[in-house]
Image (cartoon, rainbow, N blue to C red):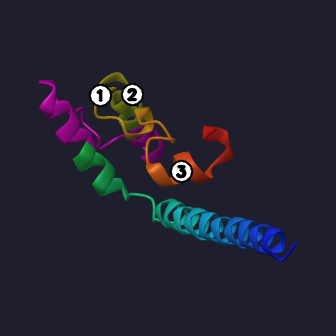
Amino acid sequence: MASRRGVVLAAVLALVACGCLGFAVSAEEMDAAVDTHTAAPPTRDEMIHAWGELLAAHGENRPDTTAMSTQEIERGWSRDRIRFADPAADDMGVSACASWKSGLFDPDCW
């Protein structure tokens, strides 16, 4: 009878330890995701520069942005990022369950 209690106690302690570890890993990944979303948006000059580099990399000329509003520049840059997107290099194409941590502790990966 005493050995049966010891086995049950060990199983409960193992489950609690795994749950705590899973919670800690999940919280760590969530903190990392929050940091990327709180970055400041690019300025007008940064958007123009990045848009020009994108177009130059694909052999196109940058449009004259002197008369464009910031919203028009952002729309054009976003449109061209989508148009020239490389699915092989896209971070969004990576499965969320690819890492062992998320594959093991995320219920959506089971």
For residue 54: magenta?
A: yes
Which residue corresponds to the image point at 32% horizontal and 49% vertical from the top-left? 47
The Cα–Cα distance between marks 1 and 2, rounded to whole angstroms, is 13 Å
Q: Nearer the viewer, mark 1 or mark 2?
A: 1
- Of labels 3 and 1, earlier in sequence is 1
Q: What is the span of residues highlighted in magenta in the rendered image?
A: 51-75
Side of 54 relative to 42 (left or right) = left
Label 1 secondary element: loop
Q: Nearer the viewer, residue 1 or 45?
A: 1
Confirm or deny contact between disc 2 and disc 3 (CB under 8 A).
no
Q: Which mark is residue 82?
A: 2
Residue located beneath label 1 in the image: 88
Asked which quadrant contains residue 107, the reply is top right
Judged left or right of residue 13, residue 56 is left
Q: Residue under circle 3?
A: 102
Residue 20 against residue 85 in the figure, above or below: below
In the rendered image, residue 19 lying in the magenta stretch gets the answer no
**In this rendering, the label closer to the viewer, 3 or 1:** 3
Location of residue 73 in the rendering, given as x and y in whole percent from the top left corner: 38, 41
Q: Secondary structure at mark 3?
A: helix
